[in-house]
Each structure stands twice: as C-alpha cells, then as structure tokens.
Amino acid sequence: MKTLIVVLVLVVVAVVLLVSLYNKLVRGRNAVDNAWAQIDVQLRRRHDLVPNLVETVKGYAAHERGTFESVAAARTAAMTATGPAQQAAAESRLTNALKSLFAVAEAYPQLQAGRNFAELQAELSDTENRIAYSRQYYNDAVLTYNNSVQTVPTNIVAGMTGFSTREFFTAPDEERGPVQVRF
C-alpha cells in the first residue's frame, strides 16, 4: 500500500512538473508573438509616414522621380515581408531609400524650413526610436523563450510538444556600422 502511495505521489509530481514546464513554454511563445506584434505596429506606423514624406519632398523636387520610386518600392517590399530575417532586410532597404530621400531634401532649404516636413521628420525619428525599442524587447523575449526551449528539463517537454526556437530580429551587416543621420 505504501508503495502504491509513493508511486501515485511521484506520478502526480511528474504531471504537475510537466504541466508547469509546458505552461512556461506557452507563456514564452506568447511573449515572443506579442513582441513581434509590437514591432509590426511600429513598422506599420513607419510605412504610413513614408508616403506623406515623399509627397512633401515631391512638391519641391519633382524631377527626382527615381528616388521617389525607390522609396515606394522599398516601402512595398517592407510591407509584404514576413519573418524576422526578411523583415529586417526589407526595412534596411527602406532605411537606405529614405536616406536618399533626405539627401534630396537637403538641396531644398525651403523644404527643410517647412513646418510639415519638420513635423514628418520628427515623427519618423520618434517612430525609429520606437522600432529600436520594440526590436530590443522582441529579441529579449526570443532569448528567454529560446533558453527555455533549449535547456533541461524544459527541452524535453518542448521536444515532445513541438516547441522550437525562434529567430532573432537582427540588423543586416550594412546597418551594423555607426549611424549617420542628417536632416
């Protein structure tokens, strides 16, 4: 009888442990999904600002059609990208296209002095800061989740229930150098 009670207690402890580890993995996965959603919100905000910025510059520099087209193409690619790696690459191309747009804007002092352009620049700068914070938050959530998926004993439960590691949101190599922003 004592043996049966001991076995029963061990089974209950094992079940509670498995449920606890499974719930930890679910919370981690949900935290990663939430963090990715926050990046997505900020990227959409950025994508919504780009057409207004292009139209403002276009009013002063209508002959810079190639620049406007490259910004539009980069924005479209960024909006349709999926997954951290593809999204990071597309956002890098959009950042480079926006740099070209700002370079065009530098040639027009009246544009730079305009209130609408200044407000759009400030809003874009604020959005870039929010994106950076969201990326950091996402990568922290991925780190915590991946550690859970890869460490003992949680990795056993993760393997049995189909949990796998997630991809970090990393900047492409060309973005890793020092940032130079000129408005």
Image (cartoon, helix red, strand yellow):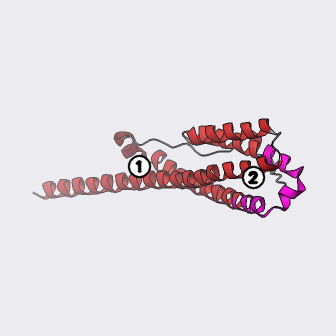
Q: Are marks 2 and 1 in contact (CB under 8 Å)?
A: no
Describe the element under mark 2 as helix, strand or loop: helix
Horizontal arrangement in the rendering, residue 109 relative to residue 131 (left or right): right
Q: Is residue 135 above or below residue 77?
A: below
Are there few (<14), some (14-19), or many (20+) residues within 10 Å of tag 1? Answer: many
User: Which residue is disc 1 drawn over?
Assistant: 154
Q: CA distance from mark 2 to mark 1?
A: 53 Å
Magenta residues, dominant SS class: helix
Q: Report the quarter where the C terminus lies.
A: bottom right
* 2 or 66, nearer to the observer: 66
Residue 161: quadrant of the picture: top left
Task: Tell me which residue sits at (22%, 53%) in the image.
Answer: 11
Q: Which circle, 2 or 1, is nearer the viewer?
A: 2
Residue 42: quadrant of the picture: bottom right
Q: Where is residue 68 drawn, in percent x and y? A: 75, 40
Horizontal arrangement in the rendering, residue 87 relative to residue 32 (left or right): right
Task: Tell me which residue sits at (21%, 58%) in the image.
Answer: 9
**Upstream in the sequence, badge 2 or badge 1?**
2
Asked whether residue 153 appears in the rendered view, the answer is no
Describe the element under mark 1 as helix, strand or loop: helix
User: Which residue is disc 2 drawn over?
Assistant: 56
Which residue type carries mark 2? Thr
The magenta-colored residue range is 99-123
Task: Tell me which residue sits at (83%, 39%) in the image.
Answer: 63
